[in-house]
Image: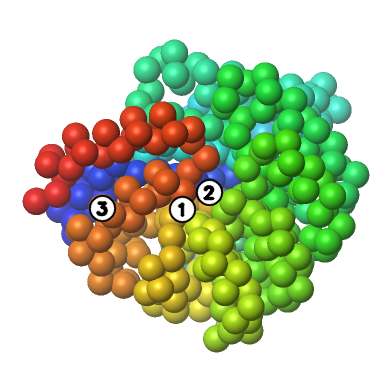
Amino acid sequence: MDKEADLFYRQIPKVELHAHLNGSVSFATMEKLIARKPHLNIESSRTAIHSGQRRSLAECFQVFKVIHQLVDSEEDILMVAKAVIEEFAADGVKYLELRSTPREETKTGLSKRRYIETILEAIHQCKQEGVDIDVRFLVAVDRRNGPEVAMETVKLAEDFMLSSDGVVVGLDLSGDPTVGHGKDLLPALQRARNCGLKLALHMCEVPSQKEESELLLDLPPDRIGHGTFLHPEVGGSDSLVDKVRKLNIPLELCLTSNIKGQTVPSYDKHHFQYWYERQHPCVLCTDDKGVFCTDLSQEYHLAASTFGLSQEAVWSLSQQAIHCSFAPEALKQKLEQRWAELRPHTLH
Ligand SMILES: CC(C)=CCNc1ncnc2c1ncn2[C@@H]1O[C@H](COP(=O)(O)O)[C@@H](O)[C@H]1O
Ligand SMILES: [Zn+2]
């Protein structure tokens, strides 16, 4: 990609709303983790999917298992979370919503509560150190673990929402979309919604989730992750599209993730086009910048070159993302102001 254009995408202020902590670990941090745990005998090639490589969804989820082995203590989580936040800031991200699945690790004595506290500590330390980024946290529910764990996770998220000074703002539903059914998780998600947690749900990531998505849309979610198979042209339905449009639910779109995970055949076939044409709120995101070897600037660049977006259009896209975030009104206004200040230095 040409250098001058690349600089533009790096310089524009950006908002990242869909980033899984353990999928966002960079190559450099991964090398450090591997060096700390030589007995695991893990090669760095197993923790990322490089350019030109594609993997089945099942293979992608195996990658997370490997990463979880490398990130299993309080010390690891603190290091990883701080590094990820700093890397997003260095890429021009001014507001980040990070998400992660609380994990218990008996080997290292890590509890789910401590897991979340450690991430909050990383966010706090970055703030103290003056890293130029505002960070909020979404507690993630892994659908594979079923309804009881989901409910337990929601209760934990609820506690932290009340005690974290506004840092914990919502709940994510993620995990292998081919495992489990969303209907079993409805009571937990309903509870989360009722107590004031915002909902960012992975939906229609694979073709078989039509019925589940109908149910989840009735909650309704505050944002949708991927939504790859919502529209009728790819096997979704008018009813799904109508609901999403009527409620104006923003979509978190992750181009490289969908290409490398093979749910979308090529960049030009990405459903960004479908929703963007209809002027539906679309937010470009990375999903797992470490696993998919990308960053948010690159995702903006790819979207612009694939769909012929002008610099002005790219700017609007990043600015609109502010309003799709779960940030409180005052922070949204502060971000708007930042965008206004930076605009003359960035757009030519
Ligand atoms: C396989 C593939 C194409 C991945 C991208 N699409 C995804 N779909 C659903 N859940 C995900 C995806 N990427 C990451 N996650 C979730 O995020 C976790 C890793 O981050 P963390 O441990 O929660 O901090 C994974 O175990 C999984 O539960
Ligand atoms: Zn995701």
Sequence-wise, the earlier of marks 3 and 1 is 1
Dot 2 falls on a residue whose secondary structure is: strand
In the rendered image, is residue 191 in sight? yes
Residue 65, given in percent of the width and then of the height, sits at: 72, 48
Choose top left, top right, bottom left or bottom right for residue 211: bottom right
Residue lying farthest to the top in this orientation: 128
Sequence-wise, the earlier of marks 3 and 2 is 2
Looking at the picture, which amino acid does disc 1 mark? Cys
Mark 3 and mark 1: span between their CA atoms? 15 Å
The residue wearing badge 3 is 315
Residue lying farthest to the right in this orientation: 148
How many neighbours does mark 1 have within 10 angstroms: few (below 14), some (14-19), or many (20 or more)? many
Choose top left, top right, bottom left or bottom right for residue 201: bottom right
Residue 60, given in percent of the width and then of the height, sits at: 65, 60
Residue for point 44% across, 19% down: 127
Dot 3 falls on a residue whose secondary structure is: helix
* Contact? badges 3 and 2 (CB < 8 Å): no
Instruction: Left or right? Give the position of 188 relative to 161.
Output: right
Residue for point 35% across, 26% down: 132
Residue 274, given in percent of the width and then of the height, sits at: 44, 76
Instruction: Left or right? Give the position of 191 relative to 315.
Output: right
The residue wearing badge 2 is 18
* Contact? badges 1 and 2 (CB < 8 Å): yes
The residue wearing badge 1 is 285
Mark 1 and mark 2: span between their CA atoms? 6 Å
Q: Nearer the viewer, residue 136 or 215?
A: 215
How many numbered badges does the structure rendering display? Answer: 3
In the rendered image, is residue 100 in sight? no
Mark 3 and mark 2: span between their CA atoms? 19 Å
Q: Nearer the viewer, residue 80 or 152?
A: 152
Residue for point 78% across, 38% down: 154
Ligand 2 closer than 8 Å to the CB at disc 2? Answer: yes
